[in-house]
Amino acid sequence: MSSAAGISRSVHEAVTRRLAGADQRYTHLRRVLVETLAAAGRPLTIPEIVASAPELPQSSAYRNMTALIDLGVVRRVAGADDHGRFELAEELSSHHHHIVCATCGKVEDVHPSPKLERALGEAARAVAEEQGYEVTEHQLDLLGLCPACRE
Amino acid sequence: MSSAAGISRSVHEAVTRRLAGADQRYTHLRRVLVETLAAAGRPLTIPEIVASAPELPQSSAYRNMTALIDLGVVRRVAGADDHGRFELAEELSSHHHHIVCATCGKVEDVHPSPKLERALGEAARAVAEEQGYEVTEHQLDLLGLCPACRE
DNA sequence: AACGGAATGATAATCACTCTCATTCTGGTC
DNA sequence: GACCAGAATGAGAGTGATTATCATTCCGTT
Ligand SMILES: [Mn+2]
Ligand SMILES: [Mn+2]
Ligand SMILES: [Zn+2]
Ligand SMILES: [Zn+2]
């Protein structure tokens, strides 16, 4: 009963598969990154990750995060401040949106209702038709104040 | 019949009002910035703006853009690449969303249907209730390929 | 054990953006 | 229409997140 384990067996399998497909290795550092992101359940900054795993050098954190992004395992999320935030790609977690605190920059996941997703799908279709784009994805950010920042 | 004029009388008035309220001046440079953003109808990067108005030094472009943001006249939009993009605040234009080209990074405006906005409003209400946030704003980005990048 | 490619990590480099500060402009006031 | 005070300008230096370098180490395979 390793405590962090409930989090993800299939995730590791998926990552292993993708790395293998690119002749790359699922090293300890990469495992730490994936594990950390999976456990967080919200997008994390590199400073946050390094703080929680001090054996992880900053340069390696950045390099491996980029590698995981290139593989489609991780997604970068733009927040309110100037630090990038990272989370597992939706294929390895599930489709969701974000709520961003305008004051402290914290980002949390939001799971959308089917009704909302239906409306978003229609919007994508309309844009495809009217502006000639091929829409592949959407991304909704709510902006506001987190419980802590509301005082 | 100045050609760029149809674009915005009330916009200049609103900007003037806000600047006055902060004891600041509506200078030539600031006029160029507002004019350029209003004419574009899509978020522009600083390099784009400087290219279209070479008399405008980069440092002044950044400084004045920041000033306009602080006044609530301009909004910063995060795109797909590492350049920030800037557009008139919604109070001076109208509420809308964006479609981002994943390949070239171009960003265009998308005007939402009432039905979509209704669904987004509901989502905001749900998050406020379930996660304790005070939601003040939302921002939807569609991601895809622009007509040019579809080949 | 030995080879070859991948990964590591300390460090330097990049690049968007911000700050500094000496100079110039602006808009009243007399 | 000179004068003053504060605002704005712009060339250049500085900041800070991210990325590239590269000598060394690790890993999987023969
Ligand atoms: Mn998320
Ligand atoms: Mn816009
Ligand atoms: Zn907060
Ligand atoms: Zn494009």
Image: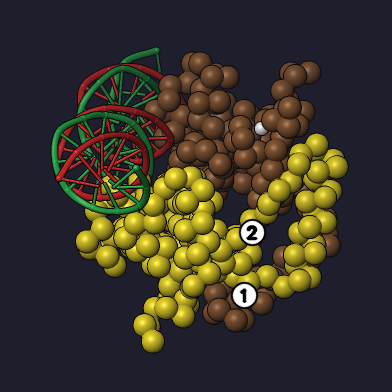
Chain colours: A yellow, B brown, C red, D green
User: Residue A33 is drawn in which quadrant?
Assistant: bottom left
Density class for disc 1 (Cα within 10 Å; few <14, some 14-19, many ≥20) is many
Residue occupied by mark 2: A140
Q: Residue at x 55, y 79 (%)?
A: B131
User: Residue D9 is drawn in which quadrant?
Assistant: top left
Q: Is residue D14 left or right of residue A150?
A: left
Q: Residue at x 35, y 64 (%)?
A: A32
Q: Chain of mark 1?
A: B
Inspect the image, locate mark 2, and give the three-letter code of the amino acid beneath it. Leu
The secondary structure type at the circle numbered 2 is strand
B69 above or below C27?
below
D21 above or below A5?
above
Q: Chain of mark 2?
A: A
- In the image, the residue with mark 2 has its CB under 8 Å from the nearest atom of ligand 1: no
Density class for disc 2 (Cα within 10 Å; few <14, some 14-19, many ≥20) is some
Inspect the image, locate mark 1, and give the three-letter code of the amino acid beneath it. Val
Q: Residue B4's spot in the image, x, y percent?
A: 72, 23
The secondary structure type at the circle numbered 1 is helix
Residue occupied by mark 1: B127
Considering the image in quadrants, where does the C terminus of chain A appear? Answer: bottom left
